[in-house]
Amino acid sequence: MYQELVQKLNAHQVALVAVSKTHPPERILDLYRQGQRVFGENRVQELAAKAEQLPPDIAWHLIGHLQTNKVRHIAPFVGMIQSVDSLRLLEEIDKQAARAGRVLDCLLQFHIAGEETKFGLDEQEARDLLESASFRVMQHVRICGVMGMATFTDDTEQVRSEFRHLRTIFNNLREHYFRDAPHFREISMGMSSDWEVAVEEGSTMVRIGSLLFGDR
Ligand SMILES: *Cc1c(COP(=O)(O)O)cnc(C)c1O
């Protein structure tokens, strides 16, 4: 399953984040031995505990909602924070990254789904964030793109239009704020049930859990 998936993604130059939440370190090592180096977790404690036990060349991506008071636990080592959904959070990431002597790669998370429960910014909120005086002086975060989750539904056309919406937001932000920033290039979208649609709609990074590890 893993090799086959990676081959398909490589053909489109799409990166794979293997979402290992709830699965034990042995299962992660299993994929690591097959070549996987990027893993995604949605909880700070679990991510930090696993990072301690597993090889240091794993890039850990935080993909779940992050509370400001937990940023300091992962700032020294995390590979990417995909779930930035407020200026306040980004300010804390900048501060903790500075303390750790790092520049942290981040994605802005957008609310593109019909469901109310999912976290994320809308386009105007992102513009306000990017235009804020506070953002302009940040030196320890690097915004590498956007992330979003589609509605959990069998309606492929709805999912497709939500992914398209995220790509439009990405294009708009790139045009207005990141023209001279080649690192602003990631559209993180697509999970086990909808990654193929996401790739068709321009995803550069999929986050896949159950397809690789089985049900949680
Ligand atoms: C759990 C999770 C995934 C992976 O979901 P699967 O359906 O298991 O592939 C992707 N993105 C986020 C933000 C998640 O929380």
Image (cartoon, helix red, strand yellow):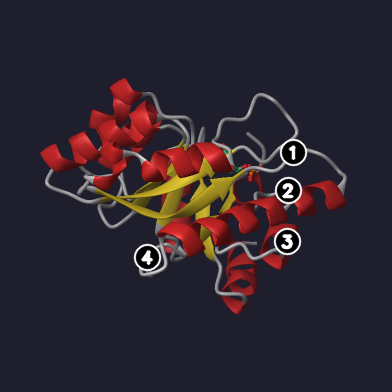
Q: Which of 10 and 22 is in front in this view?
A: 10
> Do the CB atoms of the residues marked 2 and 1 lie less than 8 Å apart?
yes
The alpha-carbon separation of the residues under discs 4 and 1 comes to 28 Å
The alpha-carbon separation of the residues under discs 3 and 2 comes to 14 Å
Q: In which quarter of the image is the N terminus?
A: bottom right
Q: Which of marks 3 and 2 is nearer the N terminus?
A: 2
Residue 211: horizontal and vertical position, in percent?
A: 66, 50
Horizontally, residue 102 falls left or right of residue 50, namely left
Q: Is mark 2 within 8 Å of ligand 1?
A: no
Residue linked to disc 3: 196
Which of the two marks, 4 or 1, is nearer to us in this view?
A: 4
The alpha-carbon separation of the residues under discs 4 and 2 comes to 24 Å
Residue under the image location 50 percent in, 64 percent down: 175
Horizontally, residue 133 falls left or right of residue 20, namely left
Residue 12: horizontal and vertical position, in percent?
A: 61, 75
Q: Earlier in the sequence, mark 4 or mark 3?
A: 4
Say which mark, if any, is on residue 212. none
Residue linked to disc 4: 183
Residue linked to disc 1: 151
Q: Which of marks 4 and 1 is nearer the N terminus?
A: 1
Name the image quarter holding residue 151.
Answer: top right
Name the image quarter holding residue 167.
Answer: bottom right
